[in-house]
Amino acid sequence: MPFSLRKIPFSVQILLGLALGVALGFLARTNDLSWLTTTLHTVGSLFVQLLKLAVPPLVFTAIVVSVVSLRGVANAARLALKTLMWFGITALVAVSIGIGLGLLTNPGKGVTLDLGGAAPPKNTGSWTDFLTGIVPTNPVGAFVEGNVLQIVFLAVVIGAAALLVGEAAEPFVALNRSLLEIVQKALWWVIRLAPIGTLGLIGNAVASYGWDLLAPLAKFTTAVYVGCAIVLFVVYPLVLVLAGRLNPLRFFGGAWPAIQLAFVSRSSVGTMPVTQRSVERLGVPREYASFAVPFGATTKMDGCAAIYPALAAIFVAQVFGVHLGIGDYLLIAFVSVVGSAATAGLTGALVMLTLTLSTLGLPLAGAGLLLAIDPILDMIRTATNVAGQALVPTVVAAREGILDRAAYESAGQRDLTEPEPAANTRPELSPVPA
């Protein structure tokens, strides 16, 4: 029988791409093969560009459709409130872990870096920029510039208006549903290229970032990875067991393809179709998942907006010799919980970091010190983001009695790239009373 790549599970394909990328990156670095490094960079960049290309139409149509779909959901306001509440609770726990690790490890003490070469990044964030930047001056410009936060604002407003207009808005809603299906189909073609994209992204990272660059920031890098690992493999399982009465192994079995893709793509929004399919296969009703996952992909950022800025703020303060008090740590927690929408699911957390630094009055040039290793950090941050985006709707559905537990128990037994079943046999959205 002829060999077919389709016979290899998608997650295994990504792991093979990861292993081959590490090998090629190591080969390029040790033998100074600039042509190989350039090739790896080009392959990885094209994959990320293809993901980014789908972001504006995907975010807009997904949120419009998800807001309108709440019309047919019993206790929709209650579900939305519970979702936002768990977003906030888990973000608060994540930022507390980031602060705790920062105080325990002192990542900036003893670090010798060229502070004269540190410059503020071109794209910075402040509360004024954040608040005024939510509302676009030109709707078309928001899509052209790929400003996800403004696209989210437009989609929420238009979706809410369509929900209130009712029957007269059905042609518009139907158009958005069709566009969403088309964009998701095209994006699935891109996602099928993830093993090749993984090879390029990881290979370029290994070829470009050697130990000589990571060594001065090794303690900080380790702290970020440890913090994300604690949230991923300690906090989230505890939430699943204590709040949802769910088996964490089943959750990771179902959500792992999305977490894995997030790690290599470094894009929460680009991973959103995989995240939503994972959540639905975990037994979350499609009507609720289509609301919770798009909102999570643009606002739920435990890695980028909680753990990372907390550790980075402590790092920058220690490098520049600035003392932080209790009030400063409370400010970090506040910014992380309230300002996480500033990251808006895009690759990187630079805006969130500069927002945190400016709120604390720390030098924005400190963000420039971390730019060199940002791609390495962004992999684990985005994986943590996406895990949280899958966790919250699963836990809320379990607590509200709308989770298909049979589907949850078998979620990890099918390849995520298999076609969806024709019929949806999950329970109706009728949350149990409190």
Image: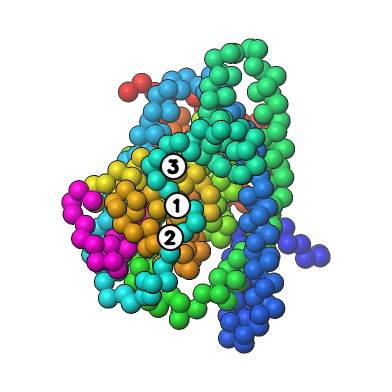
Q: In the rendered image of this protein, does residue 125 appear above or below residue 143? A: below
The residue labelled by disc 1 is 124
Neighbor class of circle 2 (other Cα within 10 Å; few <14, some 14-19, many 20+) is some
Discs 2, 1 touching: Cβ within 8 Å: yes
Mark 3, Cα crowd under 10 Å, few <14 / some 14-19 / many 20+, is few
Question: Does 170 appear above or below 60?
Answer: above
Marks 3 and 2, how far apart at CA: 16 Å
Residue 284: x, y in percent?
A: 50, 35
Q: Which residues are magenta?
A: 309-328
Q: Amino acid type of disc 2? A: Pro
Q: Position of residue 382 (x, y in %)?
A: 48, 54
Question: For the point 57% across and 24% down, which residue is it?
Answer: 158
Front-lying residue, 118 or 434: 118
Residue type of the residue flagged with mark 1: Thr
The residue to which callout 2 is attached is: 120
Q: Determine whether the residue tagged by mark 3 lies in a helix, strand or loop.
A: helix
Query: What SS does tag 2 mark?
Result: loop
- In the image, is residue 319 part of the stretch drawn in magenta? yes
Q: Can you identify the residue that label 3 sits on?
A: 129
Q: Position of residue 331 (x, y in %)?
A: 26, 46
Left or right: residue 317 compared with residue 67: left
The part of the image, by quadrant, that contains residue 224 is bottom left
* Residue 247 vertical position relative to residue 205 in the rendered view, above or below: above
The CA span between labels 2 and 1 is 8 Å
Q: Is residue 373 magenta?
A: no
Circle on res. 186: none
